[in-house]
Amino acid sequence: DGASFDPVSNTWQSMVAVGSAVSGNYNRGIWTGSELIVLSVEEISLAGGTFEYALHGLRYNPTTDTWLPMSDLENINDNSLINRKRDSFMFSWSGSKMYVVFRDGNGAGYDPALDSWETLPQCGLSYVDSSVWANGRLFAFTGVPAGAAYDPMQQLWTPLDMSNVPALFYGPFATSSGSQILFFGKDRLSETLVGALLDTDTDQWTPITPTDSPVNLSSDSMAWLDGKLYI
């Protein structure tokens, strides 16, 4: 079940039920500007005690209050899905496509206009903590720190120079304002919030100040509003 909230009238309105059309668990959604895409992970048992996974999805149209089917992404062999299904994939909206990145560095792109998936090359990182779309590219990061940027035109990942970015213990989180990416988390020793701001035009990093930053960072719930990040 689901509902939409109207802040002007301060009211909730029920959405038509999905029913059993999306199989699996751990549903997550992303807004495209006109539709809500909801994905879920299905675990499939194979011979010999091994597993593979599939992503199932639906697209919700708020104007007609209807759900539309979408093609599945199958035969996923990401081992990180075994114990971290809820957080095992991260997705971003580019303006025309949804990009999914898995913890093992593999990924895929979904085109709603064609209802089709395309496989992305492995990003070059052994593990991915966060990913985000910014300024025409898809970015993937790990708290080591290390990162890479994917150019959909060239279909190529390029490593990022993160030599002046601090290592992050808790998190890390990455969020985009459109042209900049804020990459942050907790320092292992001091447990203070540390991180850096990436200018995606130059791929140059600027450290962020920990002064007056939130201490009890225990969630990745955040939003940009009028040029500021709220956590």
Image (spheres, rainbow, N blue to C red):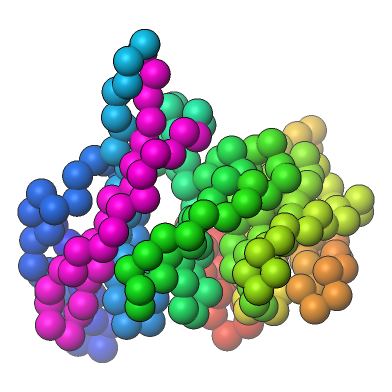
Q: What is the quadrant of residue 39 in the picture?
A: bottom left
Q: Position of residue 167 (x, y in %)?
A: 80, 42
Foreground residue, 114 or 188?
Answer: 114
Instruction: Identify the residue at image location x=75%, y=52%.
Output: 147
On the question of residue 219 being in view, the answer is no
Q: Viewed as shown, does residue 39 lie left or right of 89? A: left
Q: What is the quadrant of residue 209 in the picture?
A: bottom right
Q: Which residues are magenta?
A: 49-78
Q: Position of residue 108 (x, y in %)?
A: 50, 55
Q: Position of residue 6 (x, y in %)?
A: 23, 81
Instruction: Identify the residue at image location x=38%, y=31%.
Output: 52
Foreground residue, 161 or 219?
Answer: 161
How many marks do you count on the picture? 0
On the question of residue 165 being in view, the answer is yes
| Dominant secondary structure (helix, strand or loop) of the stretch shown in magenta | strand
Q: Position of residue 7 (x, y in %)?
A: 28, 82
Q: What is the quadrant of residue 104 in the picture?
A: top right
Asked if residue 62 lies in the magenta stretch, the reply is: yes
Q: Viewed as shown, does residue 46 lie left or right of 4? A: right
Q: Viewed as shown, does residue 224 lie left or right of 148? A: left
Instruction: Identify the residue at image location x=91%, y=53%.
Output: 164
The quadrant in which the N terminus is found is bottom left
